[in-house]
Image (spheres, rainbow, N blue to C red):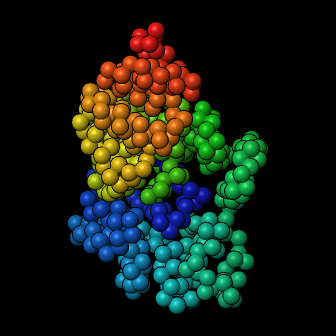
Amino acid sequence: MQAKSPNRIIFILIAVALVFSLGAKAQTPDAGLLAGCAFYRSGEFTKALESFTVAISRNNADERLFLYRGRVLLELKDNENAIKDFSEANEIIPGIGDIWLARASALAGDGDKALTFLKNHLSSDFRLPEDTIKKDPAFEGLHASQGWYALWEQEWYNDQEKAAKEVAYYVKKSQPEKAVSWLDEQITKPQASPDLFALRGKVYLEQGNYASAIADYTSALNMEKKGGQGQQFFTLNPEESHYYNRALAFLGAGRFKDALADFNKALREFPENFDGYLKRAEAYAGMENYEAARKDVLFYLNYVKNDQKAVFQCGEYYYDGGDYMNALKYFNINLKEDPVNGQYFKARGKTYLKTATYKYAISDLSMSLDLNPDDGETWMYLGLARIKSGDKTNGCSDLRKAQQLGNTEVLRYIVDNCN
């Protein structure tokens, strides 16, 4: 469970951070909610509006739905009804919709109301980082007003929130070592918060230092558990979720079972995190549970259409699981959308090799090498396809080319076929 922390609320216009209650999280996510998030993600705002409206008709006690629908209404320039939805969210959880009410009021030209809602927001546990608010284009019209200056004369942020700003500065300047050094110093101080460990864990994660990232996120989670339950946070891009980030670190470290456990927790809390299903699929695949991996990718593709990377991922899991006909189906989709992608030709070619359709394998693998001539693995597959088709001379030449390009796996095929 996440502890209360304004530092972790990230305001992203496309993948916006929202807050929701423990009771709502325990429920199975509504299909309308999921569809609405997917339509919003793809910019299909009218369809998103319809989906969220259907979801609200089934459950009018979930503040997320009103926040989401209000956000869509803003995109559709319906500020009046957006304000009604954000106000409804506030009725469910006081203060949760204030930042959106401020934005909607500002966009409607009511600067006084916008400043009032901004002040309420900054006084709450939901407040967004200072730079995020100041750079929000919705508030550009307020920048020259006396009320805006007066608002920022007051100090709204605590030491932990200032720490997040300092770390963000170093990361933005591509100086992660300075961010870690600065956090090391802060963490040694008495009563260091879980947020500081999480901040350092995030820097380690982005550096690929997975062991240190795991240790820091574990410390943060343990400290939060000891401190009791706090406010829960939801985001379509849950880069601030401790469980999700620790899962990514476990995944990077090859600890697939541990990654799966954390992805399960993160997706129970944040089911609209569609990218999380692709990452959990990687954990399943690492455990060689290709059926479960495919299910996660197919779930993702049900909501996020035409994502060729995910289509390819699904094809790979069919291939790894030995279902070559379905693998071909997905690689065919890839090549229909992108007929000059060497990776796709390679994938389909190696699959044809498995199905003993050597003519097609040779054609695809040759096309892949026309596009990526230095891929030693593709030369190996091409060599094997030629040998299987009876062309041992050219096949062995291809295998030796693979060896020259640094492929070590090919040696056993050379020994078996070419000596």
x, y (%) of residue 418?
Answer: 44, 13
Q: Residue 403: name its quadrant.
A: top right
Instruction: Using the rendered image of the protein, determine whether residue 178 is visible from the camera's viewpoint.
Output: yes
**In terms of image quadrants, where is residue 184?**
top right
| Residue 310 as seen in the image, left or right of residue 251 | left
Give above or below for 36 relative to 231: below
The one nearer the camera, 159 or 81, is: 81
In the image, residue 297 lies at what x, y percent?
A: 33, 45
| 410 or 95: nearer the viewer | 410
Q: Position of residue 264 (x, y in %)?
A: 38, 41
- The answer to whether 249 is drawn above or below residue 7 in the figure is above
Across the whole image, how many numbered discs are drawn on residues? 0
The picture places residue 89, in percent across and down from the top left corner, at: 39, 72
Whether residue 158 sits left or right of residue 373 in the image: it is right
The one of 198 and 317 positioned closer to us in this rendering? 317
> Residue shown at 63%/48% (left/top)?
199
Would residue 33 be seen by someone viewing this image from the given angle? no
- Residue in the image at 51% along x and 79% along y: 103
In the figure, 382 relative to 275: above or below? Answer: above
Q: Residue at x 66, y 59 (%)?
A: 161
Does residue 45 appear left or right of residue 164 in this picture?
left
- Residue drawn at 35 percent across, 49 percent down: 335
